[in-house]
Each structure stands twice: as C-alpha cells, then as structure tokens.
Image (cartoon, coloured by chain):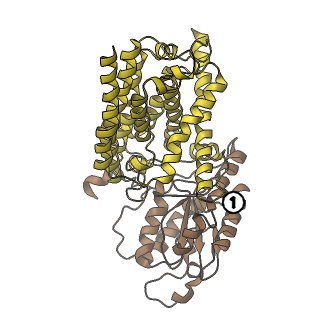
Chain colours: A brown, B yellow
Amino acid sequence: MGKDKKYFLDEKPEKLTYGGVFRRINDWARARSLWVVAYGTGCGSIELRPTFTSRFDAERLGMRMVATPRQADVLIISGYLTVKTLKRVIRVYEQMQSPKYVVALGACPINGGMYYDSYNAINRLDLYLPVDVWITGCMPRPEAILAGFKRLQELIDSGRADGWKKYIDNLDRYRENQKKIIKNWKMPNYNW
Amino acid sequence: MWAKILYAFLTLIGGIAYGLLLGGISRKITARMQNRRGPTVWQNFIDLWKLFRKKTAISHGVMFYLAPMFRLVGGAGTFLLVPVVVGSPYLSNFSFGGDLIVLMYFMVLGCLGMALGAAESGHPHAPIGVTRGLSQMAGYELPFILSVIVLMVADKTATLEGIVRAQQGGILHWHLFTHPFAAAAAFISLLGMMTSYPFQVVLAPQEIAVGPPTEYSSTFLSYMFSGRSVFAVAKYLLFMNLFLGGASNLLWAFVKTFAIFLWPLFITNVFPRLRLEQSVLFFWTWPTFLGLVDLLRIYLVR
C-alpha cells in the first residue's frame, strides 16, 4: 500500500439505508437492468458465453456483461472456488457498489461438489459472501442460468434480494470467516 | 430572454431523451444484426435510472467528482449551441454569430474534463484510455475542422445559421452534394468522434476494461451516460445543419438525425478494430486528403 493509500477507503462502511419514495420504481429498474461483472472463477464460466451471446441472448432480459466491478450489479461465482480465487472474489465483491447481488452457479459453491475433499477449494460459499440465488447442477445449462436470473429478478422486484445489506450488517462475522481461510490477508481491511 | 432559456432547457431535456432512445434503438438493431432479440428500445432509460439510484462509496478527489459534470456540461453545452430548427423561436437554442468556432472549442471540453478526472481515479487502465482518446481526437479533429473551414470559406460565414441558409432551395443545394469531398471527410471523422468500431480502441472493453470510465460507478456513470447521449444528438444535429441543409420543422430534424445516426451504427456492426497508430494515420491521410481537395477546389473555382 504505502503511497497508494489514498485510493483505498480503509474504514468500516456505514450502514446503508434503503427505501425512500422511489423504492418501488428503483426495484423495478434494478430488476430489469442487471449488469454482470465479466469474471469467471471456475469451469462454470464456460456456460456464461452461450447465455450472453446469440443463442440464448440474456440481453433481452436487460442484462449485459461489464468489464469492471465498479459498474456491475451481479457477481457470478461460476463453479468451484479456490482459496486463492476467494481472496480476489472478496475484493471484486467489495469494489462493487450497492445494491449488489451474488449468484452461485453449480454444485461446488453449495457443498463443494466434486471438490468436497480438496485441500484448496472452499465448500460453502455463504460462509464468506451473501448469496442471493443458487443455481444447482454440474454444470447448469444456459436455460437453468436464465431461470436463475428470472428468479433473481423476481426477488429484486419484490425487494427481497438483500444480501448486500446482510453483508454490511454482519461484516465482522463474514470477515472472521474469510480470515480463517485466507492466511495471508495482505490487503486493506475494507476496500470499498 | 427567460422564455428563451426555458425553451432551451426543454429542448435539452428532449435531446437527452432522444439520445437515450437512439442508444436503445442502436442496441436493438445491433441485436437483430447478430440474430438476437435484444433489449427493449427503452432499456437505456431503465439503465440510467438504475445507475442514478445506485449508492456510491468511492472517493478519489475533487477532479474525480467533477469529470462527469464536465462530460454532461460539454454535451449539453454543445447541444445548446446547435439550432434544432433554424429560425424557429422555440427550437434554435443559443446559436449566435461566430458560434461554429465556439462550438468546436466546446466539443473537446467533455473529453478534456474526462481526461483529468479519469487520470485522478488512479486505475492503470484509465490513463491508457485517456492517452488513446486524446491521440485519436488529434486524429479526427484535423479532417473535421478542415471540412468545416471549407464550408465557412465557401459560404463566407462562421455561423451555423448562415451555413443552413446557404443550403436552402432544394436537395442539390445541400453541402453533402455541393461539397462532397468535405462531407466525406467530415462523415469519416464522425466515426472517430462516436468511437464507433474501427476506431473504438479508446474504450476497448476486451483489453482495458472500459478505458477512462473504469473507476466510475453509479451516479457518476449516470451523468456521463446522459452527457454522452446528448452529445451524440448534438453531433447529429451539427452534421444535419452542416451538410443536410438543416431542418425546417421538428419532423425533418428527427428524420435527418436518424439517417445520420444509422451511418456510424452500420459501420460499427460490421468492422473489426484498428490499432491506435493505424486509426490516427488513417485520419491524417485519406479524410484529410479529401478535405484538402475540396479546399483547393474552392480556391481554384473562385
């Protein structure tokens, strides 16, 4: 860090309020404009390409891939998550701006899947990040992914996709779990 | 005076909405060309509202906050200097004598503000994008200014209104037909201004994230988004006034700007991307040559 310190907010985030006059129309717009950060953590990202290109065309639901976490709304954990990747995933998730949603793809983030006894893959994702929608399968087909996103849209539209609030409210517990797994935590404590 | 400000403000709101709608239409057309269904044409309005209402927790300094404002002001200011319908008391905005020269200065304001803000964001991709954007601007500004100079010399006026009045009296009086080489130069440089595909190395989402706006999020991005939309409409209107004979009413303004909007769109969907030095070299050879041909022609004919 050192001279780069001014680029980080190294303090605990304040609790965000949610609601207001426009809450209904906000939720409506958020559900119909999901920008997905183009970051594949595991083998599941191979299924995202057909989902977003001509064959299945997720753009008709208002979704699109963006290249930077700052502009994204949705983080897809696509498949198994190694400890090394988990560190990057946490940074990407914390760099995204609220409200933000996490979609876990495949069996691996749920219970480890075929990597359940691996020495460097995590077994349960929701110990480390709040997950809004789980899509099961190994691997889920693009149809299943689209169904999962429809589910996410319903949740957002009815104001029930509030993983980002849970994360901020229970940040200490999440951080404790994350630091149990990641031994060399060489990054700012809060990198919002 | 107050009535004029009110009309200009309403026109500006209409311009932003029209720009967002054109963006949605371009996404739809792109999707259909790629054999997809694509989003609705109102998608950009939804995106804008979502971005506007997203929270933000990033701070990189004063210039970082100001840059989206520069972008919006640059776009809106350009829009306000271009008359939508020349001679109309409601739709002529703030065009005045000598406005083409002011306009050409104003058109780079957004880019420069964006460059300062993006450089302060501290992300390594941002200065790369800024360098590319400013280099490319040096490329396309030359043929564009050459062709504008051709029109100013030919019509002996520096106002958009004078240039529009010089084109009245039928379709063959349009500068598109009376000065075809200058028009070709300007329409090629329009591709560079719109960062449409052969000259898209500035944003280049596959390699440098999205270039200058990499660190920008939520409300900042919504300002930049609307600034970009209204700037696009301003450029279409400017080209309509310069080359397509202006508009006598609002309907013609829609038809002509839509025709100009289709030109970069169709180019962008069928071309791959040029490298930076290739695109700058291209702008400094063929379009510049075309502009010079028309400039020479004016001096010889006279």
In which quadrant of the rendered view does residue B100 lie?
top left
Q: How crowded is mark 1: few (under 14 residues within 10 Å), some or many (20 or more)?
A: many
For this orientation, the residue located farthest to the top is B1
Above or below: residue A135 compared with residue B97: below
Above or below: residue B66 compared with residue B197: above
Left or right side of B244 for B297: left
Image quarter of the N terminus of chain A: bottom left
Above or below: residue A109 compared with residue B238: below
For this orientation, the residue located farthest to the bottom is A117
- Mark 1 secondary-structure assignment: helix
The answer to whether residue A17 of the structure is visible from this angle is: no
What chain letter is assigned to the residue under label 1? A
According to the picture, the residue beneath numbered tag 1 turns out to be: A153
Residue B232 image position (x, y, % from top left): 51, 35
Residue A123 image position (x, y, % from top left): 53, 82
Residue B54 image position (x, y, % from top left): 57, 47
In which quadrant of the rendered view does residue B109 lie?
top left
For this orientation, the residue located farthest to the front is B301
Residue shown at 64%/47% (left/top)?
B43
Q: Nearer the viewer, residue A148 or B79?
A: B79
